[in-house]
Image (cartoon, grey):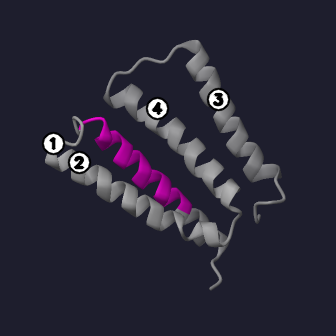
Amino acid sequence: MTTSPMATYFFLGAAIVAEVVATSALAKTENFTRLVPSLITVVGYAVSFWLLSFPIRVLPTGIVYAIWSGAGIVLITMVAWLAFDQKLDLPAILGLGLIVAGVVIINMFSKSVAH
């Protein structure tokens, strides 16, 4: 099955969003003792991995995982900062900047990624 580059990145982006939703809910599960956040977490991760199965057929596994995890780390940190009032210090911000730079470099310059 051939997947267009646009569809590949759509599925990857949707997988990232599902993972961020699941991780955000995970913070509220209280060790999986609260039903609704626990269900959101389990379903969110299941959906995320299902969506991840589409771009992984087209792009190298390491590249897909690097983009998924890197973008997920930055987005969940932003959610934690905005929604849960978790503070970031300078080293955290610099580290997140390096993660973003890594994802950008992979997408713009790597021959492993279909452009």
**Chain-order first, disc 3 or disc 2:** 2
* Pointer 3 with pointer 2, Cβ within 8 A: no
Left or right: 53 with respect to 105? left
Of the image marks 3 and 1, the number of the one nearer the N terminus = 1
Residue segment shown in magenta: 12-28
Image depth: mark 3 or mark 1 in front:
1
Residue at screen point 42% across, 46% down: 20
Q: Residues within 10 Å of mark 1 (few under 14, many from 20)?
A: few
Q: How far apart are marks 3 and 1 (CA)?
A: 34 Å
Q: Which amino acid does label 4 sit on?
A: Thr
Viewer-side label of 4, 2: 2
Q: Are marks 1 and 4 in contact (CB under 8 Å)?
A: no
Residue drawn where x is 53% and y is 68% of the image: 53
Q: Please tell me whether mark 3 sits on a helix, a strand or a loop.
A: helix
Q: Are marks 1 and 2 in contact (CB under 8 Å)?
A: yes
Numbered tag placed on residue 38 in the rendering? 2
Instruction: Work out how far the residue at label 1 is from the one at label 2, CA to CA, in angstroms.
Output: 6 Å
Q: Please tell me the numbered disc located at residue 77.
A: 4
Report the amino acid beneath label 1. Arg
Task: Give me the C-alpha separation between circle 4 and circle 2.
Answer: 20 Å
Q: What residue type is labelled 3?
A: Gly
Q: Position of residue 71 (x, y in %)?
A: 56, 44
Q: Mark 1 points at which residue?
A: 34
Question: Does 33 lie within the magenta span?
Answer: no
Tell me residue 43's x, y (percent).
31, 59
